[in-house]
Amino acid sequence: MESSPWAGPRRPTVVRLLLLLQLFPALFVDRGGAAAGVDKGTSVYPAAVVYPHHSRQISWKPRVFLYQHFLSDDEVNHLISLARAELKRSAVADNMSGKSTLSDVRTSSGAFLRKGQDPIVAGIEDKIAAWTFLPKENGEDMQVLRYKHGEKYEPHYDYFTDNVNTVRGGHRYATVLLYLTDVAAGGETVFPLAEEVDDAKDETLSECAQKGIAVKPRKGDALLFFNLNPDSTTDSVSLHGGCPVIKGEKWSATKWIRVASFDKVPHAQGNCTDENESCAKWAALGECLKNPDYMVGTTALPGYCRKSCNVC
Ligand SMILES: *[C@@H]1O[C@H](CO)[C@@H](O)[C@H](O)[C@H]1NC(C)=O
Ligand SMILES: *[C@@H]1O[C@H](CO)[C@@H](O)[C@H](O)[C@H]1NC(C)=O
Ligand SMILES: *[C@@H]1O[C@H](CO)[C@@H](O)[C@H](O)[C@H]1NC(C)=O
C-alpha cells in the first residue's frame, strides 16, 4: 500500500472543489442565535476557533485561567469605540435589596453592549462560549469598563447574596474579563484569598496586587475564573478585585456567565402585575428577599408580587 492510513482516498480536483463549495455557505449563516429569536447580530465569521495552547491555568483555588491574545486589535478597538460613547459611572448590586447603587467600592465608568449587537460582538461571544464550554445563552450583556488614574474595584464576589438578581439565569457561574489595554502600573486583577504559588513574585506588581495571586492586564488577553465550585456551591476564595490604576488608563470588558439561560426571561410574557393588594406593603417590609419563592417566584412558577419586587 502506497498511501498512509491518514491520507484518505485521493479525490479528483473537481470533487474537492465541490466539497469546498458545500462548506462555503456555512460562513454566511447565523449559527442558531437568530433562529432562537435571541441575537440581533449575525456572525459572519466561521465557527469560533480557540487554541488550547494559548490558555494556561493560573490557580486552582479559585479556578483561574488566562488566555493570551484572545482578541485581535480590531476587536479590542471596536469594543472601546462602542463603549466610549455611552460610558456611565458603574454601580454595584446592593447586597440586601439587589438594587443597583453607586458605591465608593467601585469607581469605574462603564457601558453595556447588547448581546450579539453586531457581528464583531457576536463573534467574541462565540469565542468565549467555545473557550469556556458554556453556552452563549447563559451569558449576560458584555460590560465595558474604563478605570482612570486611581480608579478601582475593591475585592468582591461575583455571585449574588440577594435573591432578586438570580431570578434570571441563576448565579454567575463564571466570569470572563477581557483586557482591552495594557496598564503601565497598577490595575491588576487580584485574588487576595488565592492559594499562593511558590514562584518568585513579579517585582512590577503594585502593592494592592501583592496578596494572593494577581494578573496584569495585557491588551487582548482574557481571564476566566469561576465563582461557584463544581458542585455549584459558592466559592469563598473567588474573591477578586481590580487594583487602583497607578499609571495610564485601563479598559476591560466583562462577560458574566450564569448557571442557566440569561436569554429566557422567566414569565416575561405575562403582565407585570401584583397578584395581591398587599404586595407593595410587603415589598417595603423586605419580603421580596425574605420570602422570594412567594414574592418573586421560581423559574417554574411566577411569584405573586413581581411588580413590587421589580423583577418584571
Ligand atoms: C453588605 O454590605 C455592607 C456595607 O455595604 C456590609 O457591612 C455587610 O457586611 C454586607 N453584607 C454581606 C452579607 O455581604
Ligand atoms: C394582561 O392584562 C390585560 C388587562 O388587564 C388582560 O386583558 C390580558 O389578558 C392580560 N394578559 C395576560 C397574558 O395575562
Ligand atoms: C392577599 O394575601 C392575603 C394574605 O395572605 C390573603 O388573605 C388574601 O386573600 C390575598 N388576596 C388575594 C386577592 O389573593
Image (cartoon, rainbow, N blue to C red):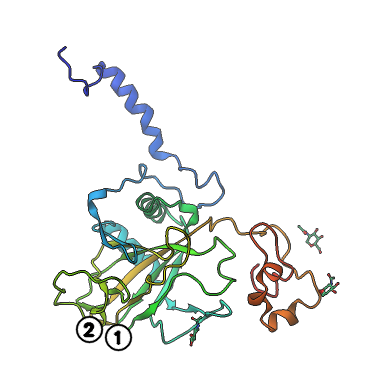
Give percent across and percent down for residue 12: 25, 15
Q: Residue furthest top?
A: 1
Q: Quadrant of ligand 3?
A: bottom right
Q: Which residue is mark 2?
A: 207
What kind of residue is marked 1? Gly
Residue 310's place in the image compared with 128, above or below, is below
- Mark 1 or 2, closer to the camera: 2
Name which residue lies at 71% across and 69% down: 294
- Depth check, front residue: 1 or 13: 1
Residue 222's place in the image compared with 5, above or below, is below
Mark 2 burial class by Cα count in 10 Å: few <14, some 14-19, many 20+: few
Give percent across and percent down for residue 89: 44, 80
- Disc 1 residue lies near ligand 1 with CB under 8 A: no
Name which residue lies at 65% across and 62% down: 298
Tell which circle, 1 or 2, labels the residue nearer the N-terminal end. Answer: 1
Q: Is residue 142 left or right of residue 263?
A: left
Name which residue lies at 50% across and 47% down: 33
Circle 1 — which element? loop
Q: Which residue is mark 1?
A: 150
Q: Is residue 292 left or right of residue 260?
A: right
Give percent across and percent down for residue 177: 35, 65
So how many labels did they put on this image?
2
Circle 2 — which element? helix
**In what quadrant of the picture does the C terminus appear?**
bottom right
Q: CA distance from mark 1 to mark 2?
A: 13 Å
What kind of residue is marked 2? Glu
